[in-house]
């Protein structure tokens, strides 16, 4: 099992202790979300298939040059997401995602957002946004080199394995439509997702 070479096990253990405490005492008018960005590329992913023994299944590649940029959050309890599609992930598009989060949770007094230390999260403009009086998002930083603690990383892995890797798509438009359909119908995958993520 590959693990980040620079992970700090003591820092991860301390963070997990704090997370479990937050989760155990979470009021009904608060919610915990896990956030991250992903950049799936339009290319063929060779996975597994049933073929005749000794045979060979050939898959023609495509360009692989176009990517879909997604910034999103995962509500692990409800197994629901808020996603934002953009040309690139930066402070501005992250603020647009945060606006969507506020709209998705109008009844929550506080929104606990667990994210990594990506540079655009530390942007001054974004920090100003978070300090605004009407902002209900409270950031909880993951320890460095801790993708294993961010449950949305498992959602991205599920997307790549069972949606992107499920078939070959000739056009980027088809690739994009299938990913949109996945998030639009996430409840159809709930049981498989819970088993895959481990909740």
Image: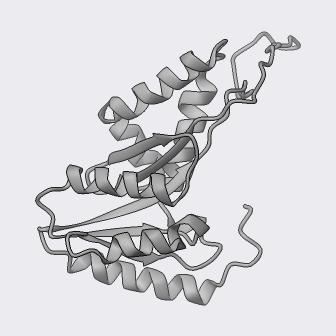
Query: Is 64 left or right of 158, judged from the image as shown?
Result: right
Where on the picture, by quarter, is residue 148? bottom right
Identify the residue at image location x=70%, y=26%.
48
Residues 181 and 198: in front is 181
Image spot of residue 192 (x, y percent): 41, 38
Residue at 14% over, 74% down: 27
| Residue placed most toward the observer, 116 or 162 | 116
Q: Quadrant of residue 68?
A: top right
- Looking at the image, is 153 positioned above or below residue 135? above
Report whether 44 appears left or right of 196: right
Residue 53's place in the image compared with 163, above or below, is above
Q: How is the image coloured?
A: one colour
Residue occupying image coordinates x 53% and y 73% = 122
Q: Is residue 198 above or below residue 112?
A: above
Where does the N terminus fall, quadrant-wise?
A: bottom right
Which residue is more in the foreground, 62 or 199? Answer: 62
Task: State the residue at coordinates (35%, 73%).
Answer: 130
């Amino acid at each position: 099992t590959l693990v980040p070479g620079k992970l700090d096990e003591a820092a991860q253990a301390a963070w997990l202790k704090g997370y479990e405490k937050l989760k155990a005492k979470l009021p009904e008018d608060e919610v915990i979300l896990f956030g991250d960005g992903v950049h799936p590329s339009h290319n063929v992913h060779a996975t597994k298939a049933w073929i005749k023994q000794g045979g060979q299944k050939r898959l023609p590649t495509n360009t692989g040059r176009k990517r879909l940029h997604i910034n999103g959050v995962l509500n692990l309890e409800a197994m629901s997401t808020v996603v934002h599609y953009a040309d690139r992930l930066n402070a501005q598009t992250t603020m647009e995602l945060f606006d969507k989060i506020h709209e998705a949770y109008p009844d929550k007094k506080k929104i606990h957002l667990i994210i990594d230390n990506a540079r655009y999260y530390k942007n001054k403009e974004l920090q100003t946004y978070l300090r605004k009086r009407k902002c209900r998002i409270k950031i909880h930083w993951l320890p460095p080199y801790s993708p294993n603690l961010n449950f949305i990383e498992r959602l991205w892995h599920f997307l790549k394995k069972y949606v992107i890797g499920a078939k070959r798509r000739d056009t980027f438009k088809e690739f994009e439509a299938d990913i949109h359909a996945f998030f639009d119908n996430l409840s159809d995958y709930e049981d498989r997702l819970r088993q895959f993520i481990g909740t």
